[in-house]
Image (cartoon, rainbow, N blue to C red):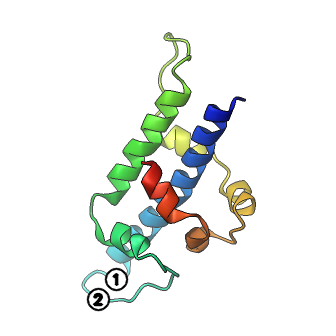
Amino acid sequence: MDSKKEKLEELEEQLVLLYRFVAQNNSFKKFYYEGVDVKPSFKDETGILNELISNNDSEEILKSCIMEIEESKEDHMDETKDKPQFHEVLDSYDTEVLYNKYGMSGVEDVDKLDIKKLIGSL
């Protein structure tokens, strides 16, 4: 795999982890904490994670970014093949493998990623 594809793959992996973090927190807010002011229980030294959680469009933005990366990775793809759906891309990543790769114990450790660099790449 060439350097550009490796960088795209790494960016997509990290975005998938970030997407899962945001989606999980939003689901918890909707299901458990609706109408309750709860302080986040995750580390966020940059404030970016709190902004992502509070922005209603974050999931959609991250989803779009992941799909754009997937399409740019697949530019050489046979045109007769269908483009993958978002859930297929998301499911193609083993989160346990990604957690180990990035030194995370779970989605709550997303702060171990270089969030500033990740967001700057978008």
Q: Residues within 10 Å of mark 1 (few under 14, many from 20)?
A: few
Q: CA distance from mark 2 to mark 1?
A: 5 Å
Q: Is residue 5 left or right of residue 32?
A: right
Say which quadrant the N terminus sits in.
top right
Q: Is residue 97 left or right of residue 50?
A: right
Q: Is residue 68 above or below residue 24?
A: above
Q: In the rendered image, which residue does mark 2 sit on?
A: 36
Circles 2 and 1: CB distance less than 8 Å? yes
Query: In what element is the residue under mark 2?
Result: loop
Residue type of the residue flagged with mark 2: Val
Give the residue number, with chain letter if any, for mark 1: 33
- Asked whether the viewer can see residue 12, the reply is yes
Q: Going by the image, does 101 lie left or right of 95?
A: right
Counting from the top left corner in percent of width and height, residue 57 is at: 28, 58
Nearest to the observer: residue 67 or residue 26: 67
Which secondary structure lies at badge 1? loop
Relative height, residue 16 to residue 8 (above, below): below
